[in-house]
Amino acid sequence: MMSLMASTTLTLVLAIISQSLPSQISANNSIYSSPPPPIHSPPPPYYYHSPPPPVHSPPPYKYSPPPPPPKKSYKYSSPPPPVYKYKSPPPSVHSPPSYKYCSPPPPAHSPPPPYYYKSPPPPKRKYKYPSPPPPVYKYKSPPPALHSPPPPYKYSSPSPSVHSPPPPYYYKSPPPPKKEYKYLSPSSSLLTRMILTQ
């Protein structure tokens, strides 16, 4: 619709412009001036532009209030029904009671049952009392001191072989002879003091 109206108005404007041109172009490209319009000529008809069609705007959105919450039905709390407890379990409906058949009595003139001789019990074995183990002698070690440092570690020397030769015997040298004390005279003692002080 809008495009049709625009094309119509465009053709009308072009027709008015072509009529109001002061000169005409002939076939041999010579420009002739058109005669002036008459003085008392009627004015050209005025074309009223039609208003644009209304824009279909969406209707205003109406906010509907939320539905009221459903009313809760009040439930009165009733006490629970009493539970009947059977002292013994009730018998099942479809199970028949277990019938116990009594054994028939023995006949009046039946022979006595055969006698089974019991074998004598085996002889009792003599009980042997186990001898007590030999006593193990334990040497009492002295109790460790409460705050004493640990004893020094002693490296165990390897045990000598059975056929190894005896170790060489080291003879101890005699102690050096004691030096005899020599008493110094007072003059010599003075000399030694002077030497020492120098």
Image: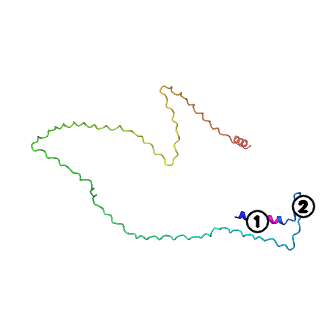
Q: Quadrant of residue 111?
A: top left
Colour scheme? rainbow
Mark 1 neighbour density, 10 Å: few (under 14) some (14–19) many (20 or more): few
Residue drawn at 75 percent across, 64 percent down: 8
Question: Which quarter of the image is occupied by the N terminus?
Answer: bottom right
Does residue 41 appear left or right of residue 105 in this picture? right
Q: Amino acid at mark 1?
A: Thr
Which of the labelled discs sits on residue 9, or is there none? 1
Does residue 102 appear left or right of residue 7 in this picture? left
Q: Secondary structure at mark 2?
A: strand
187 vs 132, nearest the viewer: 132
Q: Earlier in the sequence, mark 1 or mark 2?
A: 1
Image location of residue 77, percent across then percent down = 40, 69
Image location of residue 142, percent across then percent down = 45, 44
Q: Is residue 12 magenta?
A: yes
Count all numbered tags in the image, as a single digit. 2
Q: Is residue 157 above or below residue 40?
A: above
Q: Which residue is mark 2?
A: 31
The magenta region covers 10-17
Residue drawn at 76 percent across, 65 percent down: 9
Q: CA distance from mark 1 to mark 2?
A: 29 Å
Residue drawn at 83 percent across, 65 percent down: 19
Mark 1 or mark 2, whichever is nearer to me: 2
Image location of residue 88, percent across then percent down = 27, 58
118 vs 188, nearest the viewer: 118
168 vs 32, nearest the viewer: 32
Image location of residue 46, percent across then percent down = 78, 71
